Image: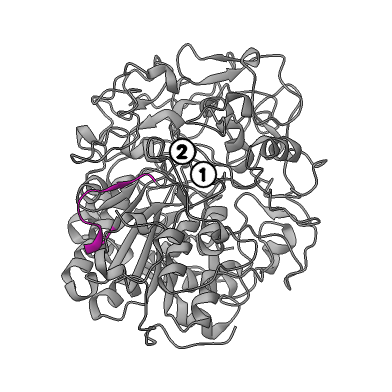
Amino acid sequence: MSLRKTVSKCFHGLRVAFVAVTVFQFCLGGPLVGSLQADEKDHTRSPIKHVIVLIGENRTFDHLFATYKPKHGESVKNLLSEGIINADGTPGTHFSKAAQFQAMPPFKTEFYISLDDSEKAPYTTLPEPSLNFSPSPVTGEPPPFPAATPTPLLAAIEPSLEVADLPLLTTGASGAEQTAEFLDPVTLEILDADTRVANFNNLPNGPFPLKGATLPYDSYTGDTTHRLFEMWQQSDCNIRNATRRNPSGCLSDLYPFVISNYTSEPDPFSFITAGLVDDNGEGNSMGFYNMQAGDVPELKKLADEYSMSDNYHQATMGGTGQNHILLGSGDAIFWSDGNGNPTMPPSHIANPNPIAGSNDQYIVDINFDGNFTECADPTQPGIAPIRDYLATLPYHPNPNCEKNHFYMVNNDNPGFLPDGTVDTKGIAGGGSIPPVNNRMIGDALNEKGISWAYYGGAYNAAVALTKIKEAGGSTTDPTILIGAAYCNICNFESYTNSIMGNATQRAAHIKDTIDFFNAVDNGTLPAVSFVKPDGLLDGHPASSKEDLFEGMVKKIMDHLTANQELFASTVLFITMDEGGGFYDSGYIQPLDFFGDGPRIPMIAVSPYTRGGHISHVYSDHVSVLKFIERNWDLKPLTHRSRDNFPNPVADDDNPYVPLNSPAIGDLFDLFDFGHHDGDHDGDDHGGSH
């Protein structure tokens, strides 16, 4: 359910106009201890004095690294090494290991997270991949910028790209005749197949390469569904499926089937959004890029030269907002009265039970409305199957759901708008969550006098645009309109009173990405930096491209390596917020009601990570918190946050599965500090490679 951010530029006095993008992802709507340049504590547990976390969007590990080949002496688990595909992307010897299934009638009448063999059957061929809102000029919807847009204007709007990469903002449209879903009135088939994909209508049942005569790497491709209850279903978890190498029993074999084709705008075929038609899924989730064919070159280059993990996971099933919150707090947030007291939301309470006659469309989620759930109450829709499954696991993970708490499980807007005003209208309608008092990493860093900042792409423009809208005005200035691409739900501090609700704290810690590049250049980078691209550069399918995200990665690397004194004590962690609903073959370790979810990329770039090392230690977004806490001797954020989990212990012959579940690593295994890390306790925290 998304639209694209586009700019239509007409020259010689004609106006500039923006078109909205991804409504479910982009929206407008403590004591102070030092400044960003405060003196750091002299003592760190490693030579790392600066941590940068760059978060892209919606790509699993296999989706990007399916055919990656490691350096000699290293091993990787991906579609190629598992024999699921060959180096050229064709089906491999063990292709059937990734076969996908569809539920068979009679359909279940209540939400489920697993199916017995008798309740599902494999696809003969995959459902067709769809365009799903990727831009097309044929119907008057160009790429984000027309080809004739002057380079200085592109540079002013997108300062996070080098000049050489600015043309990427003008390329990659599909050229297809339809960009919105269309229903054939006779067959009731939804017509928005991505015909650019080679063999799109006869794909074998498993992963397929995103390639075709008119589908180069520099292309916008279709989006896919990625919400908590859907992802639990896609994972198809049952203890009866457990093996030694997959003790959680998650098969990840219902990906195309669970995906429902949602419409984002009113249309004459409204019975689709009423849930009266099952679409039988779509194939987008099984697509992958091929590094052996030259795809994703920048991330491949960094993985070759530095370190990466092939066992790093999104922290929760579902989408952008929830995963960023786990990254910032190690925990889920809940609806409250704005002062931390739990209350019931006025609306948007999830009910994933299927609509009558359907199996993959939910009673309260058809229009992405089911954003909260009372997961402590097993009588509520969708709760018992997940809790019952967790109880069957040998390590009995705690669901971590408190009574009378309605937790956010899907994207809901933060209580603060970008300029720091409370979104009272959004809160009243349930589309924005009241400000929370959850303890975030910013609070912990403040208390220790450790400098930090959250750098959001187009943040300054978002503040200006918000103020204009609050005043009832409008603008055609593209350098302000780009503020619509600022990701408010990605800024975990936008949900909190202590930072976003405090004008002094907000000014000190919430910045624009242009401020990040300036800080790198002039040597004023804080100890901890979270960097989020705007919606045009984050790599999100349909509204962005992975080469645009790689373009921002390149600019960050150019600036970091140009300041060798800074780079010598810095690590740049590159990851994604979540997998976006794309298939991944990795092990999933359930930690609580909310996740974990599938694997996503994690690359650590530092002078201390050279060599192309691949870590297999199980980790997720909260591992970033654990790294920061270990490096600066901080305690876990709260008694219930996931940073309390121990580091994994695993067999040498099965390194992907912790023997001491639930457990997540602290990322120190990505580094080779040698004698520089002499004061850390390897028995407690894990060693370096």
Q: Is residue 80 visible?
A: yes
Which region is colored magenta? 605-616
Residue 146 visible in image = no
Badge 1 marks a residue whose secondary structure is loop
Residue 524's image quarter?
A: bottom left
C-alpha distance separating marks 1 and 2? 8 Å
Q: Is residue 235 magenta?
A: no
Rendered location of residue 91, percent (x, y) = 32, 18
Helix, strand or loop under label 2: loop
CB contact under 8 Å: marks 1 and 2: yes
Three-letter residue code for mark 1: Ser
Q: Residue 47 location in percent, x, y? A: 29, 72
Q: Residue 615: x and y, percent?
A: 34, 47
Q: Earlier in the sequence, mark 1 or mark 2?
A: 1
Circle 2 sits on which residue? 223
Q: Looking at the image, how many numbered discs can be counted on the residues? A: 2
The front one of 500 and 145 is 500
Closer to viewer: mark 1 or mark 2: 2
Instruction: Determine whether 107 is above or below 416 in the image.
Output: above
> Is residue 527 shown above or below 145?
below
Question: Relative to 227, is 153 on the left or the right?
Answer: left
Mark 2 Cα-neighbour bin, 10 Å: few <14, some 14–19, many ≥20: many
**Residue beneath label 1, please?**
2
Image point 79% across, 42% down: which residue?
378
Tell me the residue at 59%/14% (across/down): 186
Whether the magenta-drawn stretch holds residue 615 is answered as yes
Mark sitting on residue 42: none
